[in-house]
Each structure stands twice: as structure tokens, then as C-alpha cells.
């Protein structure tokens, strides 16, 4: 665990220096997380979102056999990668209270679920693909991508989380499921806020005459 933490902290530092622009830094790491999440979703299939599947509790601090560790490597590494990335990126959130709150909620959510919903974390992190928008050249196209990605992927993912946790409220992880239900509801709420903001910005750009756009 400590070696993983040190590796990612060094990795973030090097990529932060290399990209210099923190928006590109975010896009790069969220893109990496999205691809890893997609890989796990295809590899594990429905089992990655099945709360009763052993994959959900496969993360362990105990030593593993070489074959077992290799098989589940990407499933285990995504939560650590995600948590440390969010912690590292907190320094870039001081001017946006909404993003700061989002990051803090993500840290608590992922940390609370790492031993109980490991596979589901890996699946849910696919929703971070919205941040890849920063690499799109024009701001108008960034907004269009954000609106489409949020509608097509983020809303369904967090809605599924609400359904899945509500469906399992009666099991032994009652408190954790209630917490995840609240987090998923918060994510949908903040996505609605961001969607409205992005839509208004897009409208403003579309309604601005071309000669007035610098």
C-alpha cells in the first residue's frame, strides 16, 4: 500500500510539472481512470456491479499470491489511484467551492467503499470521463461534450447507484448503503447544477454574433 501511494504521488508530481496546466493534468488522469474503468467493466462484466459478488470485497491489505494479485491488479489499483489523484488535485480547487465540495465527497466516498464496494467504485469512476473535455480545443465543443457525456453516462451511472443501494438497504451494510445513496443523490444534484451552468454558457456563445467572439 505504501509503495503504491509513493508511486502515485511521484507520478502526479511528474505529470503536473510536465503538463504545467492543471486542466490538462486533470484531463490526462481522468482519461486514464476512465479507460481503466472501461477495461474493468468489459473484463468483469455484470459482476463488477453486483453487490453480492466477491469482487466487491476483493481489496485486501493481506499478502496475495502472484496470480491473484495480477488478475485483480487494475480492479485494486483504481480506487487508490482515484483517491490520491483527488487529494493531489485539491490544491487546484481553492477558487471553486463547488469543485472543492465535489472532491471532498469523492475522497470520503471512495475511502469508505474501498473494502466493501471495490468493483462498484471501479465502475462508477467511468463517470469522471467528463473531465476529458479540457483537451477539446474550443470552449463551445467542451460544453457540448460535457452536456452529452453527463446526460448519457454520468446521470445513468449515479441513478443506477441510487437504485442499487436502495435495493440493498436491508442487508448488513445498511449504514454504508444509506451513505452511498446520499452521495449518489448529491452527485446527481451537482451534475444538474453544472449542466444548467454549461447550458447557459453554450446558449450565450451560440447567441453571440461571430464578429463579437474574440
Image (tube, helix red, strand yellow):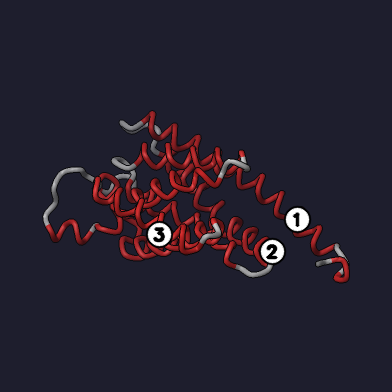
Point 65% across, 58% down: residue: 147
Q: CA distance from mark 3 to mark 2?
A: 27 Å
Pick the front one: 186 or 136: 136
- Above or below, 8 relative to 62: below
Residue 178 visible somewhere in the drawing: yes
Q: Give whichever of discs 3 and 2 has the lower sequence position.
A: 3
Q: Earlier in the sequence, mark 1 or mark 3?
A: 3
> Residue 184, position in %: x, y?
50, 41
Location of residue 47 in the rendering, given as x and y in whole percent from the top left corner: 31, 55
- For mark 3, does the 10 Å Cα neighbourhood hold few (<14), some (14 to 19), or many (20 or more) residues? few
Residue that badge 1 annotates = 201
Q: Is residue 189 visible?
A: no
Question: Pointer 1 and pointer 2: residues touching (CB < 8 Å)?
Answer: yes
Q: Under tag 3, what secondary structure?
A: helix
Which residue is disc 3 drawn over?
14
Which residue is painted at 54% across and 47% down in the image?
92
- The residue pinned by badge 2 equals 139
Q: Tell me the CA gap for discs 1 and 2.
A: 9 Å
Q: Nearer the viewer, residue 52 or 18?
A: 18
Disc assigned to residue 20: none
**Residue 187 falls in which quadrant of the image?**
top right
Amino acid at each position: 500500500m505504501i509503495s503504491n501511494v509513493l508511486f502515485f504521488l511521484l507520478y502526479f508530481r511528474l505529470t503536473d510539472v510536465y503538463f504545467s496546466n492543471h486542466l490538462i493534468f486533470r484531463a490526462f488522469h481522468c482519461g486514464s481512470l476512465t479507460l481503466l474503468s472501461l477495461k474493468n467493466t468489459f473484463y468483469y462484466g455484470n459482476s463488477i456491479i453486483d453487490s453480492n459478488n466477491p469482487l466487491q470485497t476483493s481489496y485486501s491489505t493481506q499478502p496475495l499470491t502472484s496470480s491473484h494479485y495480477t488478475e485483480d491488479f487494475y480492479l485494486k489499483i483504481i480506487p487508490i489511484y482515484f483517491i490520491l489523484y483527488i487529494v493531489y488535485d485539491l490544491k487546484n480547487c481553492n477558487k471553486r467551492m463547488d469543485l472543492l465540495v465535489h472532491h471532498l465527497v469523492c475522497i470520503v466516498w471512495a475511502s469508505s467503499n474501498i473494502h466493501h464496494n471495490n468493483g462498484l467504485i471501479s465502475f462508477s469512476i467511468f463517470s469522471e470521463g467528463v473531465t476529458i473535455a479540457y483537451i477539446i480545443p474550443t470552449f463551445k465543443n467542451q460544453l457540448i461534450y460535457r452536456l452529452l457525456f453527463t446526460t448519457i453516462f454520468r446521470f445513468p451511472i449515479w441513478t443506477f447507484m441510487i437504485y442499487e443501494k436502495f435495493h440493498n438497504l436491508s442487508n448488513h451494510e445498511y449504514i454504508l448503503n444509506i451513505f452511498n445513496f446520499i452521495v449518489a443523490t448529491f452527485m446527481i444534484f451537482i451534475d444538474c447544477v453544472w449542466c444548467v451552468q454549461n447550458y447557459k454558457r453554450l446558449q450565450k456563445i451560440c447567441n453571440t454574433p461571430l464578429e463579437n467572439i474574440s
